[in-house]
Amino acid sequence: DTGVSQNPRHKITKRGQNVTFRCDPISEHNRLYWYRQTLGQGPEFLTYFQNEAQLEKSRLLSDRFSAERPKGSFSTLEIQRTEQGDSAMYLCASSPGSVGRRTQYFGPGTRLTVL
Amino acid sequence: KNEVEQSPQNLTAQEGEFITINCSYSVGISALHWLQQHPGGGIVSLFMLSSGKKKHGRLIATINIQEKHSSLHITASHPRDSAVYICAVSGETSGSRLTFGEGTQLTVNP
């Protein structure tokens, strides 16, 4: 399967714990995006990488959130000291190219539940 | 007011009906995207358009840049079309990130 993959698919954690999610984009896609979706809402942008450079971060991304894409391939999103409000579906998407408009290809998401 | 608004929020149709979902946006855009999301979360891109009209099978997407409005049409709807349909825009000044509407839940009954 050469689509975008995300792991884990589901994560249940207790409030205050740290969690880390991984996204593997489609091979050779330069751009990688993280979005968050709560129940009944459309996704919201979190952050975006062009190769290994993090080019944009949303104001939604508090200092408890950090994302990396160390070699311009896979990316990780870490949430420290989780809160119940962090419960959501975390979506990763990738797209080819470095300029212009491109279709984004989404992974299946990681559903986080914070108890 | 959200930058991207969709209507209706929920839509129930009988198999075979012609369906229209509308999207209005309030910002300058470089492209508008229509996406489909099935239960469980997976999102599939249906269309990306910046002008005119695109067609793929029974799906048609149109955009009017002057009116900042787009429509997604489904002809001869089928129960397998049941899903959430989401409109999203790539802003002129927001890089390539997407700003999403809240989605339209479509249910097609046999």
Image: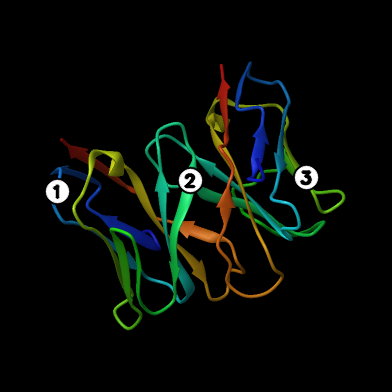
Q: Is residue B88 left or right of residue A10?
A: left
Q: Which mark is residue B16?
A: 1
Q: Amino acid at mark 2?
A: Ile
Secondary structure type for disc 2: strand
- In the displayed structure, B82 sits above or below A114; it is below
- What chain letter is assigned to the residue under label 1? B
C-alpha span from label 1 to label 2: 24 Å
Q: Residue A87's quadrant in the figure?
A: top right
C-alpha span from label 3 to label 1: 43 Å
Mark 1 and mark 2 lie on one chain; the one further toward the N terminus is 1
Secondary structure type for disc 3: loop
- How many numbered markers are drawn? 3
Q: Position of residue A80 (x, y in %)?
A: 73, 30
Quarter of the image where the C terminus of chain A is located? top right
Q: Are marks 3 and 1 in contact (CB under 8 Å)?
A: no
Dot 2, crowdedness within 10 Å: few (<14), some or many (≥20)? many
> Going 67% across and 63% down the picture, which residue do you hit?
A96
- What chain letter is assigned to the residue under label 2? B
Secondary structure type for disc 1: loop
Q: Residue B69's quadrant in the figure?
A: bottom left
Q: Amino acid at mark 1?
A: Gly
Q: Is residue B56 left or right of residue A24?
A: left
- What chain letter is assigned to the residue under label 3? A
- In the displayed structure, A26 sits above or below A115; it is below
> Going 30% across and 65% down the picture, which residue do you hit?
B60
Q: Which residue is mark 2?
A: B43
Mark 1 vs mark 2: give the one in front: 1
Q: Position of residue A112 (x, y in %)?
A: 58, 27
> Going 29% across and 40% down the picture, which residue do you hit?
B80
In-front residue for pair B71/A78: B71
Q: Which mark is residue A74?
A: 3
